[in-house]
Amino acid sequence: MADKHRFKSTIEQARGAGATVALVPTEVIPELGGLKQKRAFGWVNGVEFMTVTFPYKGTLYVGVPKAARVAAGLVVGDEADFEVMLDRSPRKVELAPELQTGTRGRGGHVDSREAGLQETLLFSDGL
């Protein structure tokens, strides 16, 4: 299981109705995979939520869903305790039958390029 990374941050307004974010401190960025978008589990003042980290203007933010923010009793401008853990679970992609036959090589076998793509889709830790 991945480690939880703890930090304090201020709830900031983001674009969109009710959308909020929190700035990830510089020292935590490498622990969360650097300046890359990653799926993550989060906790704000103990309230659990699913989120994503995302780079913006040379730093990293974590999305804070409105439901989690409200449940934690927070408004824009409040400082909060955060815990963030990368979601490293493999992603399984289900292809429609018509697409499955379109990706098969001769004799129903997957060629090496297709196998690499399937592996990338199944085990990617990004989005």
Image (cartoon, rainbow, N blue to C red):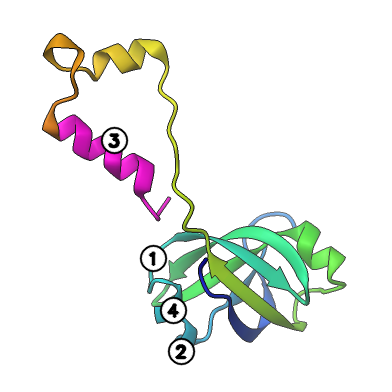
Q: Could you tell me how many numbered marks the image carries?
A: 4
**Distance CA(mark 4)–CA(mark 1):** 11 Å
Q: Is residue 109 above or below residue 126?
A: above
The amino acid pointed to by label 3 is Gln
Left/right of residue 109 with respect to residue 76 in the rendered view: left
The circle drawn on residue 98 is: none
Pointer 4 or 3: first along the chain: 4
Of the residues shown, which amino acid type is indicated by label 2? Glu
Q: Separation of disc 1 and disc 3 at Cα?
A: 22 Å
Amino acid identity at mark 4: Glu
Instruction: Give the residue drawn at x 36%, y 50%.
Output: 124
Relative to 118, is 3 above or below? below
Q: Position of residue 74 (x, y in %)?
A: 82, 74
Q: Disc 4 to disc 3, how far (Cα)? A: 27 Å
**Which is more foreground, mark 4 or mark 1?**
4
Q: Position of residue 59 (x, y in %)?
A: 44, 78
- Element marked by disc 2: helix
Q: Which residue is mark 2?
A: 27
Q: Which residue is mark 1?
A: 36
Question: Which residue lies under the disc numbered 4?
Answer: 31
Q: Magenta stretch: give its range.
A: 113-127
Q: CA distance from mark 2 to mark 4?
A: 8 Å
Residue at 15%, 17% (x, y): give it. Answer: 105
Secondary structure of residue under mark 4: helix
Residue 76: percent from left, percent from top:
76, 75
Q: Position of residue 13 (x, y in %)?
A: 68, 69
**From mark 2 to mark 1, how far is it between C-alphas?**
15 Å
Mark nearer the viewer, 1 or 3: 3
